[in-house]
Amino acid sequence: MRNPLVASLARAVAARGLYALRFNFRGVGESAGQWTGGELEWEDVRDAVQHAHTVLPRGPFGITAFSFGAFQTLKWLANGGTVDGVALVGVPLRSADQSRQALPPVPEGTFIVAAENDQFGTAAELRAALPQARIAEVKGVDHFFVPKRDEVGQLVADELVRALASKVP
């Protein structure tokens, strides 16, 4: 939740008039629970979305997530999670040890911001692996998008505003 890119995403979304909720996964920071190494953390995404629905019962709702959070968001979607807009950043094709990891299903048309030189999955690799996704490439950066975090935030905010505008209740 305190990751500089995650903070940039939240600021960009809030600047567009949307509410932004950030959270730590179980066992991270002061969050309760036991870290499961990615096995059950998708449930934390579910719980955060459920919490958002109690705070703002009327939608529409969108979600953005970075790296591990993007992977867990895909797992949540695969387990029946639904929102009106999705914008993922730095979807990892490889784990921290650089071994290839199978992604959960990526829904048709999912918007993904990818770094040209991402050590966990470049924009070109993501395009090849996920032809059904819409990939926006940020040139000249690696997985952490330094110094282009604001550009990433704008791409995400633009996508969520576009997606949510067609879902106004």
Image (cartoon, helix red, strand yellow):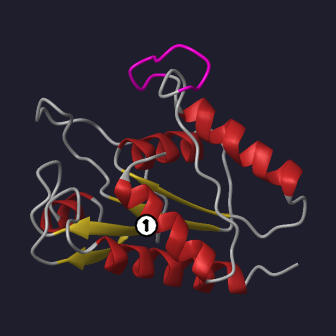
Q: Quadrant of residue 88?
A: bottom left
Q: Residue at x 25, y 75 (%)?
A: 148
In the image, taking residue 102 as reference, residue 56 lies left or right, namely: right
What is the chief secondary structure element of the magenta stretch? loop
Residue 1 at x, y = what percent? 49, 45
Which residue position holds label 1?
8
Q: Residue at x 58, y 43 (%)?
A: 23
> Which one is nearer the viewer's eye here, 2 or 100?
2
**Residue 28 in magenta?**
no
Residue 79 at x, y = what percent? 61, 38
Q: Residue furthest top?
A: 34
Q: Is residue 112 visible?
A: yes
**Residue 31 in magenta?**
yes
Q: Residue at x 44, y 45 (%)?
A: 69
Helix, strand or loop at mark 1: helix
In magenta, the rendered stretch is: 30-39
